[in-house]
Amino acid sequence: MVRVREQSHITPTGEIDLERWLAQLPTLHRDDDEHRLLEACRLARVARDRPGRDLSDWAHDPDCFAAGLDIALILAELHVGTDCLIAGILYRAVREERLTLDEVEQGFGGGVSHLLSGVLRMAAISDLQTQIDSPVLGQQHGQKDNIRKMLVALVDDFRVALIKLAERTCAIRAVKNDEERRWSIAREVFDVYAPLAHRLGIGHLKWELEDLSFRYIYGDAYRKIARLLDGKRLERDGYIARVAEELTRVLGDAGLQFNISGRAKHIYSI
């Protein structure tokens, strides 16, 4: 089941409190990190009001500034460094052409602009995604598999893939009430980015991407399984832990040698 997230940096009036947002990040280790992150946030906020282009692979709301903050929060959970967080904050503004890579490099250095350049290349490859998984030019593998391989092959920095995965996670979260765009984004995530998260070993993002895309593509099946589940994910985790503890006690008393493992499965996995 998809988690419910609190956005404590959003005020009751809908404004973004940057200090609250910053407080949600892990403890900063260098004195200049906080300053650089806030400068990136301010630049993204300025870029939001510049002319740019709307993208078909994103809901009408949130804007590039709010989206950048959400992307960075996901990246923070992956314990990335400051350059990666800044790239996450600025990515949507750069892709919407409200901000240039030259501006980013001047303000934050070549490391950040290099990451953004890599994510833009991933986005360009992802744009080749089609809805028909048919062989191309006699190849044995379908287009979706080819695209996944191309994405992995062109990534020269693991952080580039993390930024793109975080951005696609935000995108699929944002289309909850956007029926026009929901299916196409879910299809792309289901075919390309959930498998990519699995290949990179990022389990919690893989589970969320699978569940959300499954919910939007196969809504009836998703709802049927959700109704049949006994309790929420945390409750099921607790149940499994209690059963494992009881089995450990009983089998241990019987003098048996054993290993016990278990986990709650997410809806798509079921």
Image (spheres, rainbow, N blue to C red):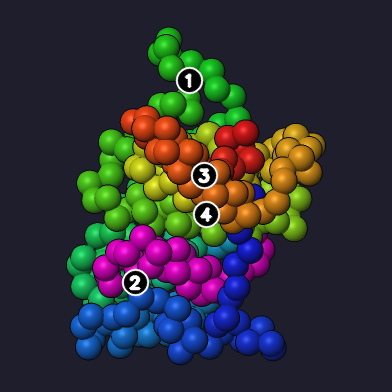
Q: Residues within 10 Å of mark 1 (few under 14, many from 20)?
A: some
Answer yes or no: do the residues labelled 2 and 1 have beta carbons within 8 Å?
Answer: no
Amino acid type for the residue under numbered disc 2: Ile
| Disc with the residue nearer the chain's start (4 vs 2) | 2
| Disc with the residue nearer the chain's start (3 vs 4) | 4
| Disc with the residue nearer the chain's start (4 vs 1) | 1
The residue tagged 4 is 169
By secondary structure, the bulk of the magenta-drawn segment is best described as helix
- Which quarter of the image is occupied by the C terminus? top right
Amino acid type for the residue under numbered disc 1: Gly
Residue 183 found in image quarter: top right
Q: Residues within 10 Å of mark 3 (few under 14, many from 20)?
A: few
Answer yes or no: do the residues labelled 4 and 2 have beta carbons within 8 Å?
Answer: no
Please give the name of the residue rendered at 47% of the width and 50% of the height, measured from the top-left corner: 204
Query: Which residue is nearer to you in this view: 179 or 52?
Result: 179
The residue tagged 1 is 142
Please give the name of the residue rendered at 69% of the width and 88% of the height, measured from the top-left corner: 13
1 or 3: mark nearer the eye: 3
Q: Secondary structure at mark 1?
A: loop
Q: Secondary structure at mark 2?
A: helix
4 or 2: mark nearer the eye: 4
Query: Which residue is nearer to you in this view: 71 or 77?
Result: 77
CA distance for labels 4 and 1: 24 Å
CA distance for labels 3 and 4: 38 Å
Q: Whole-percent x and y of residue 89?
A: 41, 71
The residue tagged 2 is 86
CA distance for labels 1 and 3: 47 Å
The residue tagged 3 is 246
Q: Residues within 10 Å of mark 4 (few under 14, many from 20)?
A: many
